[in-house]
Amino acid sequence: MRSYALWFLSASAILGPLGCDPDVGGGTCPDPRDPEVHYVSHEPECPGIDVGCAPTQTAFSDECGCGCIGPEPAACPDPGDPEVRYVSHDPRECHLIDFDCSWPQTLFSDECGCGCVGPEPEACPDPNDPEVHYVSRDELECQLIDFICPEGQEYMSGFPSACGCGCIGPEPSVCPDPRDPNVRYVSHDPRECARIDFDCSPPEELFSGECGCGCIGPDPLVGRSH
């Protein structure tokens, strides 16, 4: 009996290190105390369990169990917030649809769904407003032309570029009278005025607006001896 006991102790001493240990990786199991380690199950390999991790996390499944490693995803935009507009709450559907957010809104698309966050864009200036003067309603043309707003008017700013470009403010008092000998029109077309470049010789002064563009003042050549 004593010889059997001695044999059992010897065998245990030899085989003990080779026995099953829940941490066979020598301390390589993800630490459940780590705030970025999220176990779904501690059952080895987690048979039959589908681990779904956020895009910011990495899935693991081994002898330690299974789960996700990485920072928790940010909170979903609150659908009750008036500045949050969901297009879809289904991430799979979000991959199939195409949409844009109007400035100044920003687009989001993640595990929460997809949509736009931000204040509603301002409406374009009303072309029927007597103080709204469009030079062009074409976004691309507005990038190419240069124009001057008459005194008392301001350039359209703070609006989506798709609105177009022009000036906002009261109309100038009256258009320069083309019959006045001191008024010299270069063009009566504001769009053409935006594309051409000209100077007025003192004492003439340049004008450019809804009326067109040209020079006002006594012609510097009149009365000059030749």
Image: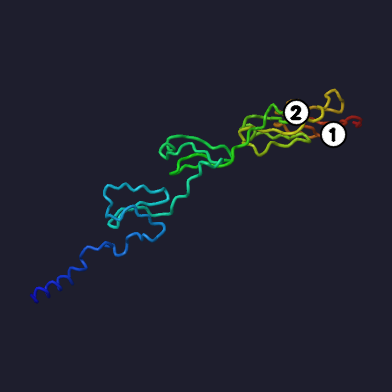
* Residue with the mark numbered 1: 204
Say few, some or many: other residues with alpha carbon within 10 Å of mark 2 (under 14 / 14 to 19 / 20 or more).
Answer: some
Residue 67 in the image, given as x and y percentages of width and height: 34, 53
Point out the image quarter for the C terminus: top right
Q: Look at the numbered disc 2 and give the secondary structure of its residue.
A: loop
View extreme (bottom): residue: 2
Q: Earlier in the sequence, mark 1 or mark 2?
A: 1
Residue 157 in the image, given as x and y percentages of width and height: 67, 38
Gap in Å between the C-alphas at discs 1 and 2? Answer: 19 Å
Above or below residue 58? Residue 172 is: above
73 left or right, relative to 41: right
Q: Look at the numbered disc 1 and give the secondary structure of its residue.
A: loop
Amino acid residing under circle 2: Glu
Residue 12 in the image, given as x and y percentages of width and height: 17, 70
Amino acid residing under circle 1: Glu
Tell me, for residue 142, which label it has, or none. none
Point out the image quarter for the N terminus: bottom left
Tell me which residue sits at (42%, 35%) in the image: 96
Residue 5 in the image, given as x and y percentages of width and height: 11, 74
**In front of the other: 197 or 52:** 52
Tell me which residue sits at (79%, 32%) in the image: 207
Tell me, for residue 210, which label it has, or none. 2
**In front of the other: 71 or 4:** 4
